[in-house]
Image (cartoon, rainbow, N blue to C red):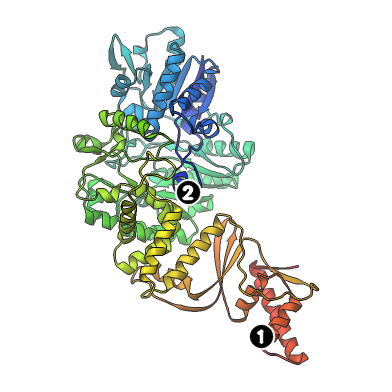
Amino acid sequence: MRVILSSTPYVDYGSWLSESRVPRTIGYIPIGLLSLASVLRDQNHTVSLFRVSAFWEEHWLHEGPIGANYERAADAILIESPDLVGFSTEYYTFHHVAKIAAEIKRRSPRTVVILGGPQATATPEATLKLFPQFDLIVRGESEVTLLDLVDALESDRPLADVPGLCIRTDGTLVRTASRRLIDSLDTLPVPAFDLVPIAATDLVSIEAGRGCPFSCAFCSTNNFWHRRYRIKSPARLCDELEHLQQTYGVTNFSLIHDCLTANRREVVALCDEITRRQLAISWGCSSRTDTMDVELAELMAAAGFTNVYFGLESGDPDTQKAIKKNLDLDASFSLIRQLRARGVQVTTPFMVGFPGETYPAVKHTFSAINRALMEDVFLAQIFATAPYGDTPMLESYTGELSFSGHFIDVSQSASEVAIRDELMRENPSVFSGHFRYQTSGIGHLIEGADQFFPLMNEYRYTYTALNQLSDDPLYVFEKWSEWLRRSDRTNSKLASFRHYGTFEEFQAFLHHLIAFRSDESPFLTDLFDYENTRLRLTQGTSFRETHNPHLIGEDTGPRIRLAPAIVLKRYTHDILAIIEQMRRQDAPPSAVPFDGTIALAIRDGRLTVYQSTGFAAEVLAYSADSLPIEDLVYRVSSRQSVAGEDAVASIRANCLETITSLESTGLIHVD
């Protein structure tokens, strides 16, 4: 059978936050579909992969109705005349998948069109009733079920005999018998990585295992994987890692698992195997802070572990209990601090908008977010709590939902958005992820929170300083929300969408707040400039600031110059000392005088900051002009009003010693 498996589109958040970019979709590696493809190919079926995001990124029509883009995607899929098209589903873009499927069915009624994944599994009957373009739904874990389904279609065997489906039978919707989970994931073939473009520099996801034994009330993996922890054997996982390394040159991996470290013994065995094989790789995973300690982290780090995703969710102890997360946040932050000290990058997602959540509870969460930023996490995320289908939380609060209409989407007209929203509003069982739980007076804090966190992270020190000085963890976010409400406008690029601000506007907003407080906290200006400089440098903007624009003398002899990817700044406040004050989190930051030069440098892809005072600062500043060493000696001698050969020789010796020291740090080069 000829099968095409299609991923769901994924919208690039960052494209919404920059005034210079058009909202767009981005490609990704759909690891689940690659596993399904490999299973089918092992049984001699012809399988292709269609990536909607990648197709739309290249072929999206920005003018005219959005329906033309659905038609183009359907035409591209049907070029290969598939017998079966299978779509994966994701809450935020499922409506686009449904439209593409309708165009496929309209053009080729005999093509079997199916759905799978968590979205479809949660509400199969309601989905099939609402969307007749889908012939059936594959429920739960799909590898064995999909293979059985294809065999039944080819042999004309009754679909009712295939476990794990939801089908149409004599006008009714029927769930076939449930299918057991696969006992050993090692029995699955290696995913069909050849179906996607992979470069040596890519971060490549491989599936380490499935299932989480915990019971968080908001999480949809509970029922989907039956809270059963499974992991591939160390040998099998390392075989996949080696395959990707040898075939594509990949060395950076994400080990996909709901909670990899839930079984310590398995993780230790994996690390031992990576070490035994001497795999020169780096990798990250998702985990819980109560399933990891420093001893395990150090063992993992020795095997290439470099980053971790810790879901903290809430900073409020009562909310922690209510959502059944039950983390000790002090212990969590203690672990995070120790991991950061060992160079492990940490991402910490938080959520707002749990059922009945109050303003004080959200304030506790934002306090924890500020704390995470000052513990130097790589990224602190904020998400509005979505009532995903088939979760314990939704089962308890089904009747207490309200439609939000707030999420990131691709370009559409106002009338198209109205039609989209009406479809979702009228069908909460299928589109529950677009609704919100009832809360206690915090609606203004939920809407737009997930567009705020990228802005907050980029200006984390200015953001945190303003909050600490105000003794209010919500100060900046609430002021920003007020700023946007006063503007009362739609998105500058897409008039049909509510405006949630851009990086450029957030920069202007912070400038306004700082000006308001500059008399009492004058260091904020230097801190804000430091962050702007850091962002320009890390984003690859080419610029150089010259603090000593003197006339350059004759171009003779060795020349000192500033190394690439370095920016020099002179501040009157000690930025690093002020940041350290904020990280201690025991008092608001205060001014610390400073007289010298600060150098911001990119080293191995990371920002490094150097401070120089006195003579070293002067030499470093002159290096920005690419001076001959003798010209440098002349300028220093002139500034100090030095005369006589002995005095000039002393200056020259001091210059050479300082140049040697600065060159050893990589800040300057001598040609």
Measured from the top left, where is residue 489 in percent x and y? 35, 47
- Tell me: 195 left or right of 466: right
- Decide which of 23, 372 is in the foreground and name it: 23
Kind of element beneath mark 1: helix
- Tell me: 204 left or right of 348: right
Query: Alpha-carbon distance for marks 2 and 1?
Result: 46 Å
**Could you tell me the amino acid type at mark 1?**
Arg
In the picture, the quarter occupied by the C terminus is bottom right
Residue behind mark 1: 639
Q: Are marks 2 and 1 in contact (CB under 8 Å)?
A: no
Residue 19 marker: 2
Measured from the top left, where is residue 348 in percent x and y? 39, 52
- Decide which of 462, 157 is in the foreground and name it: 462
**Could you tell me the amino acid type at mark 2?**
Glu
Asked whether residue 217 is in view, the answer is yes
- Decide which of 501, 298 is in the foreground and name it: 501
**Does 472 appear above or below 219?**
below
Measured from the top left, where is residue 420 in percent x and y? 34, 30
Kind of element beneath mark 2: loop
Q: Which residue shows up at 48% across the image and 47% down it?
A: 284
- Tell me: 136 left or right of 624: left
Measured from the top left, where is residue 409 in percent x and y? 40, 37
Residue 616 marker: none
Q: Quadrant of residue 331?
A: bottom left
